[in-house]
Image (tube, rainbow, N blue to C red):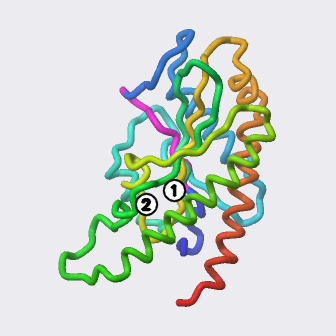
Amino acid sequence: HAQAGGPSVYVDAMFGGDETGPTNNGVHAKVLTLNVSKEIVQAIPQMGVSTLLLREDDRFLSISEKIRYLHSANALAYLGVKIELASRDCIHIIHPSDESSFRPRDQSKNSSDDIFPVIAAMAKKRSASFAKILQDKLSKTSVCTSTETHSDHLLEVSSLARPTIIIELQTTGSRGSYLLNRIKMGEISAAVAMVIDTYINKLRVDMGTEPN
C-alpha cells in the first residue's frame, strides 16, 4: 500500500532535457508530454486519489531515478505519458508482457523465489485491467485506441504488484490533427484523469479484500 500522505499515482511525463522526443512545427514532444501530464494531474477529481509528477520541468530522469522515487513512496500505480509522430492519430495503451521483469531489483540472492510468480501474475493482471478500462473510456473520445504489451521501460518500474501503464499519443502532428485538438481541449486529459480516479479507488477496495 502507498505510504500515508504519499501519492497514490506517479505520472511520468516522458522525455525531458536533451531527450526532446520528436519535433513538429518547432515544438518538441517533451513540451507537449509535460503539458498533457500536468493537465491529467490537475483534472483528477479530489476523492483521495493523490498524484505526483515525476518531472515538473525540462529535465531528464533516468530509469534508476524513477525507480528510486517509486519505491520510496510505494505508490499504488505508475502512468507514463509520451507523444510520438505517426502516420495517423491513435492512442496506444501499453502494459507489461514479460512477468519475469516484475522481480524487484534489490532482491537478495538468498531470498525465496516462491512469492515472485504470484506478484508478477498480480501485477500483470492489474496492469491489463487498468489498460482495458482506459481504452474503454478513451474510445468514447472518437480517437483511435488500442492496447498492446511491451517489455521495455514499463517493467523496469514494476514491482510489488503495481499496475503500470504507458499512454502513447501517436499523432500526425498536423495543425488539423484530431488528436492534438482533443488534447488542446483537455478532453483526453479529463478522460484519463477520470479513469485514474475510478481505477485507484477500485484497486483500494480490491486490495482491502485480498488475504494478507
Residue carrying label 1:
164
| Mark 2: amino acid | Ser
Q: Position of residue 212 (x, y in %)?
A: 53, 90
Question: In the picture shown, does residue 177 fall above or below 193?
Answer: above
Decide which of 140, 51 is in the foreground and name it. Answer: 140
Gap between marks 1 and 2 measured at Cα: 6 Å
Q: Is residue 12 magenta?
A: yes
Residue that extends furthest to the bottom in the rendered view of this protein: 212
Report whether 18 appears left or right of 57.
left
Q: Quadrant of the N terminus?
A: bottom right
Do the residues under discs 1 and 2 have CB atoms within 8 angstroms? yes
Residue 140 in which image quadrant:
top right
Q: Is residue 48 magenta?
A: no
Residue 172 in which image quadrant:
top right
- Of the numbered discs in the image, which one, if any, rests on residue 158? 2
Question: In the picture shown, does residue 176 fall above or below 127?
Answer: above
Q: Position of residue 120 (x, y in %)?
A: 43, 69
Residue at the image position 65 percent from the left and 70 percent from the top? 203
Residue that extends furthest to the left in the rendered view of this protein: 109
Q: Which residues are magenta?
A: 10-18
